[in-house]
Image (spheres, rainbow, N blue to C red):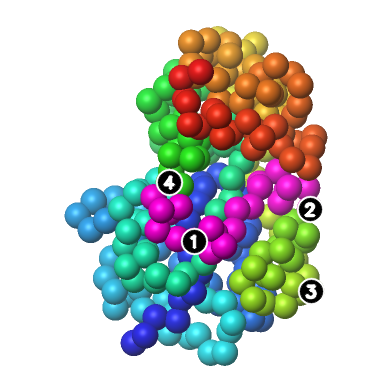
Amino acid sequence: MTLPVNFVGIGAAKCGTGSIHRYLGEHPEVFVSPIKETNFFIEDGQRSPRKRVRSMRAYERQFAAVEQETAVGEYSPQYMNHPSAATRIAATLPDANLLVSLRCPADRAFSAWAGRACSGVERRPAEVALRPGNPYVDDGFYLQRLAPYLKLFPREHIKVLVFEEFAADPAATMAGLYRFLGAEPGFEPNVSVRLGTIRIRVTHVSMRAGRRSGACSRTGSALRSRSCAGTERCFSAAWPSRPRMTPRCARGRSSCTATRSPAWRICSGATLRCGKR
């Protein structure tokens, strides 16, 4: 079977990828794999429980129902965190388009911690878990994570979405994404359905964790504002010696959720190239 796949979503986790996958699947000209996060292109031999499709035959079965759809693909946000996945995708699907959703690194890290804490997997308080060298933090150094893909795929084949813009106007973001994939941009997905109720769960988990660790006063501003600046203040209290992830936000000059061009995106080039500023 010749793989009909012509796009792959590669990241990032906790950046709205569940909703994006759903809205892509609603479009009559787009086919997405029934399993989100197949993680097929994660390197063989890595005994990762996240790898849900392990053989080429199983991967092909994900697209057995494809008919006349213009865009065919899958979304596995963990690909961005596995450099070898870039090589495997390029070898198998050299002409594929790549989709990337990025979010304020501080908000993304906090959301990742909160989701795992809510499920009981993570038992450390935020002030302990959100430290240098931990994947919660390291996964937010986007330039490092994207470097292998930028070397193997032309820039015009990579579509970068900004989570803050997607959250503010999902219909407009999806119209641009449909256009990028060659599908009718006028289609309107049901954006009233959004996956990932992290805002509700964050408050519950964070206050519970705060009572255990005495960190309520340190996380309170982040919970109330849910902005990059608020989360940055939380990080500053819990992790005073860390590299600055969002310097403009830390100085209070801008909020990631307040502008069309988020502050973290403006400063990310210098920050991600020099993580010890």
The mark closer to the camera, 2 or 1, is 1
Label of residue 147 in the image: 4
Label 1 to label 3: alpha-carbon separation: 27 Å
Residue pictured at 73% horizontal, 47% vertical: 165
The spot of residue 158 in percent (x, y) is 54, 59
The residue sitting at the bottom extreme is 67
Find the distance from the CA under tag 2 to the CA under tag 4. 28 Å
Q: Position of residue 127 (x, y in %)?
A: 50, 17
Question: Mark 2, residues whose alpha carbon is within 10 Å: few (<14), some, or many (≥20)?
Answer: few
Of the numbered discs 1 and 3, the one sitting upstream in the chain is 1
Question: Which residue was labeled with disc 2?
Answer: 169
**Residue 171 located left or right of residue 201:** right
Residue of label 3: 186
Q: Residue at x 61, y 71 (%)?
A: 181
Q: CA distance from mark 2 to mark 3?
A: 15 Å
Indicate the amino acid at tag 1. Answer: Pro
- Gap in angstroms between the C-alphas marked 4 and 1: 12 Å
